[in-house]
Image (spheres, rainbow, N blue to C red):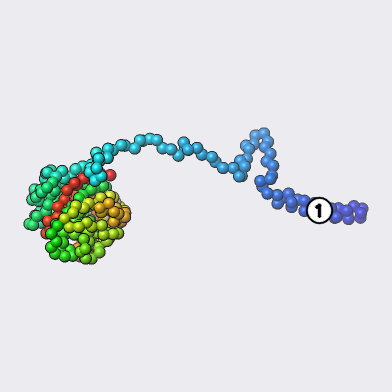
């Protein structure tokens, strides 16, 4: 009896070690058995294999729009805001104190030009999100300096001014030069041409959205601008309506679609080839 007990105690460590080896064996080497009525277990190292068809979206088809023959000319789906001949078909002139009247700007060499004593002009149509192309020219004869040289502006939705200025070797405050969102964002670079040469802005604008609070943006207006083909405003979020004195954020009021306004600021700035695409 004693011999049997002693022999059993001698075998016990070996059995325990053998059991531990079985428990510590990597899961990948275990053999899986399947009995009738049981689903087979997916191997732990397997992967789900996709085909390229599962990530291809075919419908609805992207609509085709005929591009312009020349870069800068309007594509097929653009609204022509100035055709070089008639101002009053798309524009009207603002009157001090409110109201409008027919535009008194002159047409010269296929361009419309502000004149002394006239007011700013704005589109008869209103817009939300859009792509806008506009070409402009400051006087070739340099008079004045800083903000007094070729001053005008493009207002988006009547509220947000993209500055026009003769910024060819004309020092002024950086958030008020050509390509600036006035008093908010200076342009990334000064892409100005010489006075008297045609320049262009290509603008992509996303209108603000409002929630229940009518004095703050749910999402602010965002704008990207190219000046003479160069990126100068990269998806900037506007802080609020343009103001000469004050804080833009304090002027926010809920609004919907608005007009494009061209500012008359006492300088004879000319405009041509203006078109817009609603987005």
Place of residue 111 in the rendered image (x, y in percent of width and height, measured from the top left): 13, 48
Q: Can I make out residue 13 in this image?
A: yes
Q: Is residue 134 above or below residue 251?
A: above
Residue found at x 16% / y 65%:
145
- Which quadrant of the figure contains the C terminus? top left
Mark 1 packing: few (<14 Cα in 10 Å), some, or many (20+)?
A: few
Count of numbered badges drawn on the protein: 1
Determine whether, in the image, residue 46 is placed left or right of residue 256. Answer: right
Residue that protrudes farthest toward the top in the picture: 36
SS at badge 1: helix
Q: Is residue 258 visible?
A: no
Residue 84 located left or right of residue 42 = left
Percent across and percent down for residue 236 are 30, 56
Q: Is residue 70 above or below residue 157?
A: above
Tell me: 9 left or right of 248: right
Residue at 14 percent across and 45 percent down: it is 84
Residue at the (21%, 65%) spot, across then down: 171
Residue 93, how many percent across, how many down? Answer: 11, 51
- Establish if 89 lies above or below 165: above
Residue 41, how many percent across, how many down?
62, 40
The residue shown at (31%, 55%) is: 234
Depth check: give the residue in front, 213 or 191.
Answer: 191
Residue beneath disc 1: 14
Q: Quadrant of residue 73?
A: top left
- Which residue occupies the foreground of this view, 230 or 127? 230
């Amino acid at each position: 009896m004693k011999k049997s007990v002693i022999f059993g105690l001698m075998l016990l460590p070996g059995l325990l070690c053998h059991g531990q080896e079985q428990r510590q064996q990597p899961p990948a080497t275990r053999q899986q058995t399947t009995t009738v009525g049981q689903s087979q277990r997916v191997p732990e190292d397997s992967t789900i294999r996709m085909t390229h068809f599962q990530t291809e979206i075919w419908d609805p088809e992207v609509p085709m729009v005929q591009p312009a023959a020349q870069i800068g000319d309007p594509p097929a789906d653009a609204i022509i805001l100035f055709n070089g001949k008639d101002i009053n078909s798309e524009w009207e002139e603002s009157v001090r104190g409110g109201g409008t009247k027919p535009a008194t700007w002159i047409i010269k060499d296929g361009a419309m030009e502000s004149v002394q004593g006239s007011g700013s002009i704005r589109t008869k149509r209103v817009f939300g999100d859009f792509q806008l192309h506009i070409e402009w020219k400051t006087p070739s004869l340099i008079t004045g300096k800083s903000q007094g040289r070729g001053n005008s502006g493009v207002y988006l939705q009547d509220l947000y001014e993209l500055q026009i200025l003769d910024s060819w070797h004309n020092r002024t405050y950086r958030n008020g030069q050509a390509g600036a969102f006035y008093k908010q964002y200076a342009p990334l670079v000064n892409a100005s041409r010489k006075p008297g040469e045609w320049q262009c802005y290509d603008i992509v604008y996303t209108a603000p959205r409002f929630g229940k609070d009518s004095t703050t943006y749910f999402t602010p207006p965002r704008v990207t601008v190219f000046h003479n083909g160069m990126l100068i405003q990269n998806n900037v979020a506007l802080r609020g309506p343009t103001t000469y004195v004050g804080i833009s954020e304090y002027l926010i009021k809920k609004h919907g679609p608005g007009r494009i306004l061209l500012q008359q600021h006492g300088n004879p700035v000319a405009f041509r080839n203006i078109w817009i695409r609603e987005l």
